[in-house]
Image: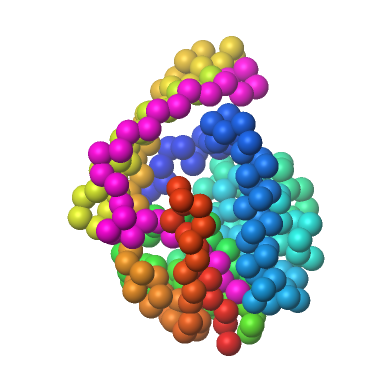
Amino acid sequence: MGELSPIYRHAEVYDAFYQGRNRSYEAEEEERARTLVGYVRARNASASSLLDVACGTGRNLRCLVQEFEHVEGLDLAEDMLRVARKRLPGVPLHQGDMRDFHLDRRFDVITCLFSSLAYLNDAEQLNAALRCFGRHLNPGGVIVVEPWYLPEDAQSGRVVADVVTVGGQTISRVSHTVVEGRTSRMRAHFLVADSENGIYHFTDLHILSLFTRQEYEKAFAEAGVPAVEFIRTRRDRPGLYIGVKP
């Protein structure tokens, strides 16, 4: 895992862009959360505590606080946590690295969504992260991971462009993704304009590892979860890996 991409130091821009990109974004977030809770309850009906790793600005946790008695979040980017703390007053939020964090409790559910594990550099780091998840998971607990694409499914040469306006701020984003070996390299240019700051620009580079299904399954085994199920979700998402700790 290398240096954080600039977008994770522009948390308000991150939030505004994804909100403006999809008018039904909040409704889709809530639907995703309901689906996730359904998967968890089917495997552990009494689950009452949840840790969201790579929680970002807390939008996903916002949809889960009513579903579990106790929730916490963890993220590497302090600026993302700054926004999450405003959104989730009273919810414990921790700054930490998913490969090696140490909290003072275990949880019934640990989630890591939006392909965040793909920012790990190699299978060794993937195994370390899942081992850390396993140390923080109660017996019978559920791990839910949203992966990045498998090597055979990754698209190269993809260009995506969006312009959104939210709360008086206009954001233009153009990205180009190529496959290089076992990684997807996505470079994105952001042009942001508002009345207070004028116009400014920054460039993002995201290097996402293309782990195989066998590598994800081995990482779950390293977490003490020897059986993992892969679930297909929406056509435009890579699916979910779900495992239960014996």
- Please tell me whether residue 207 is drawn above or below residue 14 in the rendered image: below
- Horizontal relation, residue 48 to residue 201: left or right: right
Front residue of this view, candidates 232 and 102: 232
Residue found at the far left of this picture:
181
Coloration of the structure image: rainbow
Front residue of this view, candidates 103 and 145: 145
Image location of residue 171, percent across then percent down:
50, 23
Which quarter of the image is occupied by the N terminus? bottom left
Q: How many marks?
A: 0
Q: Is residue 50 magenta?
A: no
Q: Residue at x 59, y 14 (%)?
A: 196
User: Is residue 136 at least partly visible in the picture?
Assistant: yes
- Please tell me whether residue 26 is drawn above or below residue 119 in the rendered image: above
Q: Is residue 151 magenta?
A: yes
Image location of residue 140, percent across then percent down:
64, 82
Residue found at the far bottom of this picture:
246
Which quarter of the image is occupied by the C terminus? bottom right
Q: Residue at x 45, y 48 (%)?
A: 236
Q: Residue at x 51, y 13 (%)?
A: 198
- Please tell me whether residue 33 is drawn above or below residue 126 in the rendered image: above
- Horizontal relation, residue 57 to residue 241: left or right: right
Which of the 4 image quarters holds residue 52? bottom right
Q: Residue at x 64, y 76 (%)?
A: 43
User: Is residue 108 at least partly visible in the picture?
Assistant: no
Image location of residue 226, percent across then percent down:
47, 84
- Please tell me whether residue 161 is drawn above or below residue 96 in the rendered image: above
Look at the image and give the residue range highlighted in magenta: 142-169
